[in-house]
Image (tube, rainbow, N blue to C red):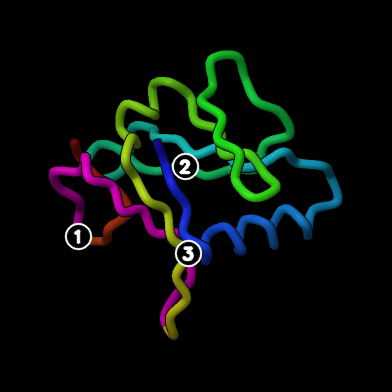
Amino acid sequence: MITLTESAIGQVKRVIGEQAASYVGIRVGVEGGGCSGFQYTLKLEQASREGDDVVQVEGFQLLVDPQSMVYLDGTEIDYVETLQAAGFRFNNPNVTGSCGCGESFQV
């Protein structure tokens, strides 16, 4: 299961609310790439796909394909704003290492 902090929930609601099109939620995924082998993906979705894990989160859906769930199970997603940057941060207990920039990971 994947969870979102209140800060992440608020940010997702804000972004969905700003869109001209209608979205049911966000898709969280993992794809090959980056220095360490895998990187996270986030995108708005208008519908779920067959086989998706679907989690209802305060007015929107969190959608995850089965292949990504293998790597994301137990992950907490936070939204952090600092003077230097703002963005979603993944606290993934399955990660065994990451690159220096923090953009990719390995399991």
Mark linked to residue 100: 1
- In this picture, which residue range is highlighted in magenta? 84-99
Which quadrant of the figure contains the N terminus?
top left
Nearer the observer, disc 2 or disc 3?
A: 3
Is 89 left or right of 63, judged from the image as shown?
left
User: Is 36 rendered above or below residue 101?
Assistant: above
Q: Position of residue 33 (x, y in %)?
A: 33, 37
Is 21 left or right of 37, judged from the image as shown?
right
Is 86 left or right of 19, judged from the image as shown?
left
The kind of residue on which mark 2 rests is: Thr
Q: Earlier in the sequence, mark 2 or mark 3?
A: 2
Q: Nearer the viewer, residue 32 or 83?
A: 83
Q: Residue furthest top?
A: 50
**Residue labelled with disc 3:** 79
Nearer the observer, disc 1 or disc 2?
A: 2
User: Which residue is at a point 47% across and 64% down the rendered structure image?
Assistant: 79
Q: Quadrant of residue 37?
A: top left
User: Which residue is at a point 19% across and 50% down the rendered structure image?
Assistant: 98
User: Is 79 rendered above or below residue 93?
Assistant: below
User: Is 8 rendered above or below residue 93?
Assistant: below
User: Which residue is at a point 20% across and 39% down the rendered structure image?
Assistant: 106
Which quadrant of the figure contains the C terminus?
top left
- Quick one: SS at disc 1? loop
Is 64 left or right of 22, judged from the image as shown?
left
**Residue labelled with disc 2:** 41
Report, in whole angstroms, how far the alpha carbon at label 1 lies from the one at label 2. 19 Å
User: Does the magenta portion include 89?
Assistant: yes
